[in-house]
Amino acid sequence: MSGIEFSEQSIPGSDLLALDRQMCFALYSASLAMTKLYKPLLSELGLTYPQYLVMLVLWERDGMRVSGLKERLHLDYGTLTPLVKRLEKQGLLVRQRSPEDERQVIVRLTGKGHSLQSAAARIPEQVATASGCSLVELEDLKTQLCALRHRLHSQLDVQLGESA
């Protein structure tokens, strides 16, 4: 544990349960605002935000196993599989069984999936501009959020290990 202790006395004049004091709400509401910002940009590409995330990973590294996508996106199979199936139905990718291990499914972009990358290339700049932050501020924020996610996942791993 970090040794941080919260009490009414440690934060004078505060209500620890006030909504505006909650980090979870700040993250949640910022995430909602970000997703709303992406929605019209992605609708031009025919993608939802979760589908866009799958495409981003495949544009980085085509020919990934579904298990690799799961790990990279921090999603469970119940969420990821329908996303991949819808992208396949749109003709953006194909799923194939691994020749080495039939249990593994490999996801590959189609020509249409590859060509969508150039249309998506303008989105990060539009989002950065809309944020009103400098590129340094955005990079710092992203770094802090990734570190927070890592610490939270580590804590969840500890908790899950204790309950097993």
Image (cartoon, grey):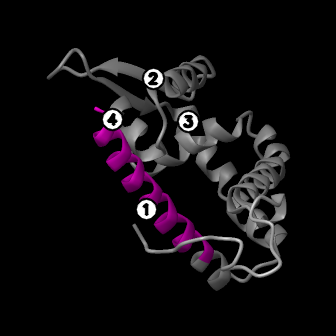
Tell me the crowding category of disc 3: few under 14, some 14 to 19, or many 20 or more residues within 10 angstroms, Cα based: some
Q: Which mark is residue 113?
A: 3
Give the mark, 2 or 4, whose residue is nearer the N terminus: 2
Give the mark, 1 or 2, whose residue is nearer the N terminus: 2
Stretch in magenta: 141-164
The CA span between labels 4 and 3 is 42 Å
Picture quarter with the N terminus: bottom left
Give the residue at mark 2.
Answer: 94
Tell me the crowding category of disc 2: few under 14, some 14 to 19, or many 20 or more residues within 10 angstroms, Cα based: some
Residue 49 drawn above or below residue 127: above
Give the residue at mark 4.
Answer: 163
Three-letter residue code for mark 4:
Ser
The CA span between labels 3 and 2 is 10 Å
The spot of residue 104 in percent (x, y) is: 27, 22
The spot of residue 116 in percent (x, y) is: 63, 42
Give the mark, 4 or 1, whose residue is nearer the N terminus: 1
Frontmost of labels 4 and 1 is 4
Residue lying at 68% horizontally and 56% vertically, measured from the top left: 24
The CA span between labels 1 and 2 is 35 Å
Q: Can residue 163 be found in the magenta stretch?
A: yes
Tell me the crowding category of disc 4: few under 14, some 14 to 19, or many 20 or more residues within 10 angstroms, Cα based: few
Give the mark, 4 or 3, whose residue is nearer the N terminus: 3
Give the mark, 1 or 3, whose residue is nearer the N terminus: 3
Three-letter residue code for mark 3:
Gly
- Asked if residue 70 shows in the view, the reply is yes
The secondary element bearing badge 3 is classed as: helix
Give the residue at mark 1.
Answer: 151
Frontmost of labels 1 and 3 is 1
